[in-house]
Image: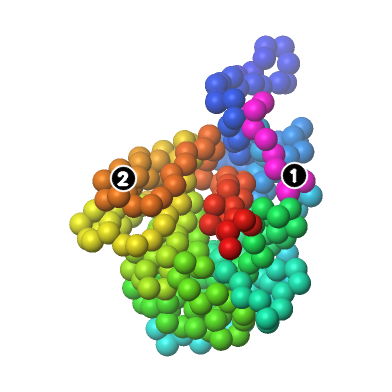
Amino acid sequence: MKKIEGTDLFYLKGNAPADARIEYWLMFGKNSMWSLDPLNPFKSLNGFGELSELAMPTYERHKYFNEFIYGKKGGVENLKVHEIDSECLGYKHTIHVYLPPGYNSETKYPVLYLQDGIDYVEFAQVPTTIDQLIRDNKIKPMMAVFVTPPNRFQPGIPNRMTEYGLNDNYVKFFAEELIPFVDKNYSTVADPKARLVTGDSFGGLISAYIPFARPDVFANGCSQSGYQSFNNDKLINLYKLEQKKDIKLYVDIGIYEEVVGASFLPKEESNFLEANRRFKKVLEDKGYDFVYKEYSEGHTWGNWKRHLIDVLIYFFPKDEQ
């Protein structure tokens, strides 16, 4: 930032698309900790805490998040919690289950499954979003299952990286343990076409892989800012080389995701934007049924929660019987 001579003020000048939304911190020195902008009340959340949010003139904040625009977290108070002892993985797994208003065992419900489960609750406020979409007759009544990896925000193993890195044991857990548990204990539509698996980043990678590996269980997948460059484009190459699966996909990415995980990912894998464009090309060439979107945003929960609304309306529209 540049200092305005004769004052204690600094400024930064730049350009962004009119519909962009950017999250940022301030640093007051090379080795200082990051800080929120004290003059900006708008905040978004992630695993590191709060970030200040800048919205350009044509970006529209969604009314569903009005109570969260200043940094409020979503809560798990109204969710059912279960612990599944997984033989496929060799350890227990915690899930939280959202039930729609008026849930009853006489009705069968489609189900959304989310990786990084508690993150989607706290940072993306998904239960509130689904409530509002149902009340506004935008989507049919549905359930959601939030699947949280072990050692959340901790260095221990297993964790989200060991699970989401195209781990076939994790896919087996999803298909052969998690789905039967949910279908047995809740009133679900036991049909692959009524199930959607969704995730962000590394979770977006595994969410594009699960329906590919087990289309008999999941016919729908959504990858938000997916880590498609993982292991030298391994997933992209699987889609390219293997027979087309009877599945539907929704893939989105931010234009500011050209350098993700610079401190810990291989440099050649850090450009998520270009990797998702390569994935799109393969999906086109193979003739997949898919939606692809690019947004003027970054690798953030503010991005994913806003556009998950479009995903849910696409897969679970109210007028579909």
Relative horizontal placement of residue 22, taking residue 156 as reference (left or right) = right
Where is residue 209 drawn, in percent x and y?
A: 37, 63
Count all numbered tags in the image, as a single digit: 2
Display colour scheme: rainbow
Relative horizontal placement of residue 275, taking residue 196 as reference (left or right) = left
Q: Quadrant of the C terminus?
A: bottom right
Q: Say which amino acid is labelled 1.
A: Lys
Mark 1: give few (<14), some (14-19) or many (20+) Cα within 10 Å. few
Asked if 24 appears above or below 154 in the picture, the reply is above
Where is residue 190 drawn, in percent x and y?
A: 51, 77
Q: Mark 2 sits on what residue?
A: 284
Q: Provide the major secondary structure of the magenta segment.
A: loop
Residue situated in front as seen by the camera: 87 or 245: 245
Magenta span contains residue 150: no
Asked if 307 appears above or below 155 in the picture, the reply is above
Residue situated in front as seen by the camera: 102 or 44: 102
Where is residue 118 drawn, in percent x and y?
A: 61, 65
Q: Which is in the foreground here, disc 1 or disc 2?
A: 2
Q: Which of the marked residues, 1 or 2, is nearer the chain's N terminus?
A: 1
Q: Quadrant of the N terminus?
A: top right
Residue 219 visible in this rendered orientation of the protein? yes
Magenta span contains residue 60: yes
Q: Residue placed farthest to the right in the image? A: 67
Q: Residue drawn at (79%, 49%), measured in percent from left and top?
A: 67
Q: Which residues are magenta?
A: 56-66
Q: Quadrant of residue 161?
A: bottom left
Q: Residue drawn at (45%, 62%), measured in percent from left and top?
A: 220
Relative horizontal placement of residue 77, taking residue 53 as reference (left or right) = right
**Numbered circle sitting on residue 63:** 1
Q: Say which amino acid is labelled 2.
A: Glu
Residue situated in front as seen by the camera: 48 or 279: 279
